[in-house]
Amino acid sequence: MKFEEFRGQTVFITGGASGIGKAQAIAFLKNGANVFVLDRDEENLKEIFKQYENHFAYTVGSVANKNAVQQAVRQAIKKFKQIDILLNTAGVLDGYAKTLETEELLWDKIMNTNVKGTYFVTNSVLPHMLQNERGVIINMASIAGIVAGGGGAAYTASKHAIIGYTKQLDYDYCRNGVRANAIAPGAIKTPMNKADFLGDSQMAKWVAEETPAGRWADPSEVADLTLFLASKAADYIHGVVIPIDGGWTNK
């Protein structure tokens, strides 16, 4: 998808080293945007940098570390002068653990990354957007934020929280020029889901069969939706959660 309007804009992405986040980064880079990524996976970040070094920068760190987040945002603004679009994409799974199987350490890991991390990054970028009186924020939810069965107790709770946070974020700041929405992916073939494809990949086959569309999606399909939601064409779309799940939540 081509959007000339992104040329010269700056996109800050968390979790942009692999999977959906990487696909988002590449999509915006191909549309002429500057991209800054915060991620823990330096090797994959180096590979992206080799291809797009003039418009790509990154820092290695976790969204759950407030100091690392604040430093990354400062670096992004110093490098590219502004942040126009924020993609809170970083997240971790919980292995579909039920609540009685969820130890406190696992609960905290999921919440600190998926929820508190989104809060840390948003609160670091948002004042800059408010100062410029414009900005777009797209948070990564999940079908687990809409229905049961998309994750375990902690992951499902975290993605429900992201949806609520997104709605309130847009409600509070849309008249100040900042628009927020969320994307809720279903079965997307990413490194995060690689366990489903191990061995005879029966889990992957079952998921495809249970999905009305009959297949897993490619991360680039989520990236294309992100491009649209961040564009001027979506300017009247506020505080919504858009599933991209092959019809899973229709069932």
Image (tube, helix red, strand yellow):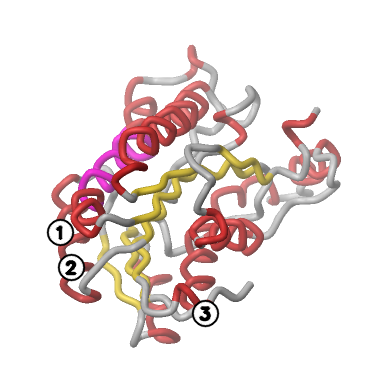
Q: Is residue 44 above or below residue 141?
A: below
Where, by quadrant of the figure, is residue 50 drawn? Answer: bottom left
Q: Which residues are magenta?
A: 112-125
Tell me the mark number nearer the camera, choosing from 1 and 3: 3
Precedes in sequence: disc 3 or disc 2? 3
From the viewer's side, name the closer residue of 211 and 95.
211
Local crowd at mark 3 within 10 Å, few (<14), some, or many (≥20)?
some
Q: Residue at x 38, y 71 (%)?
A: 45
- Report the residue marked by disc 2: 75
Q: Residue at x 67, y 46 (%)?
A: 244
User: Is residue 174 shown left or right of residue 222?
Assistant: left
User: Could you say whether the residue bearing mark 3 is in a helix, strand or loop?
Assistant: helix
Precedes in sequence: disc 1 or disc 3? 3
Question: Farthest residue toward the top?
Answer: 100
- Report the residue marked by disc 1: 71
Where, by quadrant of the figure, is residue 86 drawn? Answer: bottom left
User: Could you say whether the residue bearing mark 1 is in a helix, strand or loop?
Assistant: helix
Q: Position of residue 99 (x, y in %)?
A: 49, 15
Q: Amino acid at mark 3?
A: Lys
Give the CA distance from mark 2 to mark 1.
Answer: 6 Å
Give the CA distance from mark 3 to mark 2.
Answer: 22 Å
Q: Is residue 75 above or below residue 154?
A: below
Q: Position of residue 181 (x, y in %)?
A: 48, 43
Q: Residue at x 20, y 68 (%)?
A: 77
Instruction: Specify the principal SS of the magenta part.
Output: helix
Specify the label residue 30 is tagged with.
3
From the viewer's side, name the closer residue of 107 and 77.
77
From the viewer's side, name the closer residue of 90 and 135.
135
Local crowd at mark 1 within 10 Å, few (<14), some, or many (≥20)?
few
User: Could you say whether the residue bearing mark 2 is in a helix, strand or loop?
Assistant: helix
Q: Amino acid at mark 2?
A: Gln
